[in-house]
Amino acid sequence: MRKKPGIVAIAAGALALTLTMVGSEAKPVEHIEISASRFSFEPHEITVKKGDPMILSVRSTDVTHGLVIEELGIRTEVKKGESEDLPITPETAGTFEGKCAHFCGKGHGSMTLVVHVVE
């Protein structure tokens, strides 16, 4: 039987990566799902911890929506039926208001998401 050196190298690399991850104290990444639909985000308010990495998954259910939270470096646009994963690590505590950044109809101006970043 002939050995395949490429597969052995990949397996060895995966084992080394696994051992490194087990030995390190990396924080788990929190995953928060946010649904955008006329004219609200759900949930419309979230609380996260300063310095903790996370992924905000924004999904649009009906039309194209956007989400902008300048202070957290968030700016995205999401088309109907699609989602966007936004990796962030908040570095400043406070309360930040995000807004829909794509005109979605008459109630667009009241479509907000509040993010509380706590110590």
Image (cartoon, rainbow, N blue to C red):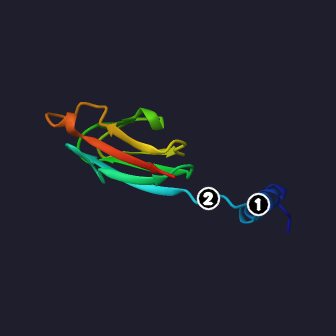
Label disc, if present, on residue 110 of the rendered structure: none
Q: Position of residue 80 (x, y in %)?
A: 29, 42
SS type, badge 1 = helix
Q: Position of residue 59 (x, y in %)?
A: 34, 48
Q: Nearer the viewer, mark 2 or mark 1?
A: 2
Q: Separation of disc 2 and disc 1 at Cα?
A: 14 Å
Q: Residue at x 51, y 42 (%)?
A: 92
Residue 22 relative to residue 105: left or right = right
> Would you call the spot at circle 1 few (<14 residues within 10 Å), some (14-19), or many (20 or more)?
few
Q: Residue at x 86, y 64 (%)?
A: 2
Mark closer to the chain start, 2 or 1: 1
**Displayed quadrant of residue 33:** bottom left
Q: Position of residue 110 (x, y in %)?
A: 21, 38
Residue 31 relative to residue 11: left or right = left
Q: Residue at x 84, y 57 (%)?
A: 5
Residue 60 relative to residue 106: left or right = right
**Displayed quadrant of residue 6:** bottom right
**Displayed quadrant of residue 22:** bottom right
Quadrant (top left, top right, bottom left, bottom right) of the N terminus: bottom right
Residue bearing the label numbered 2:
27
> Would you call the spot at circle 2 few (<14 residues within 10 Å), some (14-19), or many (20 or more)?
few
Q: Is residue 24 above or below residue 118?
A: below
Q: What is the three-letter code of the residue carrying label 1?
A: Thr
Q: Is residue 8 above or below residue 53?
A: below
Q: Position of residue 95 (x, y in %)?
A: 39, 44
* Contact between labelled residues 1 and 2, with CB atoms less than 8 Å apart: no
Residue bearing the label numbered 1:
20
Q: How many marks?
A: 2
- Judge by depth and name the residue closer to the eye, 94 or 6: 94
Q: Residue furthest left?
A: 106
Q: What is the three-letter code of the residue carrying label 2?
A: Lys
